[in-house]
Image: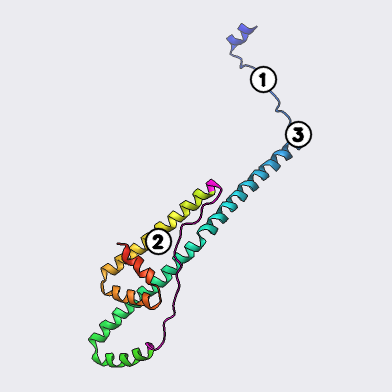
Amino acid sequence: MVRAAVARGAPPRKVVTAPRPVSVTQTLVNAVKSVEEFVSYVDAHVTKSTAIEKAIGSSKQTFETEKTVIDAAMEWAKMTVDIEAELSANPNLRKHYADLEEILNNEPSPKITISPIAMPPSHPDSDINAAISLAYSNLMDERSRYFIQIRNQIKSNPSLAQHVQSRLQELGCFSSWREIESHG
């Protein structure tokens, strides 16, 4: 019979197996485990993110303050250079500007305190500590690039240097000018 079936080319019989029944209880247990794993993952991520922000938050704040003050000093310097060019071209305008400048110079400049940036302390969890170190390193790289960019702007227009320096010193930001000078 087998030879006859093979000779006729009859298709082989399919063997059908029934899937194992899954219990409702096991399905619920698996779902709960999946939720627990997800919550655990999210909790670890939040813990790590919070630790990073706590460790480098003040350094980020300091850098943002530095950028704000330096950008304002750069804009002030550019405006001063433009005004000087206009005044050189128009002596009559210089006379009126001198009166205005005398009034403006009587207003004291506010003093801005910029705290120094320091390496964050070590964290007891080695994974979190590595993440903090990486975040701090990235922040310092960004800061370094920023100061190089400012230095390059000043190099491209040397008349800005004196005005930026004097403005930063008026504001009490001597360290910001030293940072600009040291990158280049």
Q: Left of 134 or right of it: where is 97?
A: left
Write down the quadrant of residue 173 in the picture. bottom left
Q: Residue 90 location, x and y as percent?
A: 24, 89
Q: CA distance from mark 1 to mark 2?
A: 69 Å
Q: Left of 119 or right of it: where is 30?
A: right
Nearest-to-viewer mark from 1 and 2 = 2
Tag 2 near tag 3, CB within 8 Å: no
- Which segment did they paint magenta? 104-127
> Which mark is on residue 15?
1
Write down the quadrant of residue 91 in the picture. bottom left
The amino acid on which the numbered mark 2 sits, given as a three-letter code, is Arg
Q: CA distance from mark 2 to mark 3?
A: 58 Å
Relative height, residue 157 to residue 9 (above, below): below
* Of residues 125 and 14, the one drawn nearer to the viewer in this rendering: 125
Residue at the spot x=33%, y=64% of the render?
149
Give the SS element for disc 1. loop
- Mark 1: few, some, or many residues within 10 Å (few <14, many ≥20)? few
Relative height, residue 122 to residue 165 (above, below): above
Give the SS element for disc 3. loop
> Which mark is on residue 143?
2
Q: Earlier in the sequence, mark 2 or mark 3?
A: 3
Q: Earlier in the sequence, mark 1 or mark 2?
A: 1
* Of residues 18 and 178, the one drawn nearer to the viewer in this rendering: 178
The amino acid on which the numbered mark 3 sits, given as a three-letter code, is Ser
Residue at the spot x=54%, y=49% of the render?
128
What secondary structure is the magenta-colored segment mainly? Answer: loop
Q: Which residue is mark 3?
A: 23
- Mark 2: few, some, or many residues within 10 Å (few <14, many ≥20)? some
Nearest-to-viewer mark from 2 and 3 = 2
Residue at the spot x=56%, y=55% of the render?
51
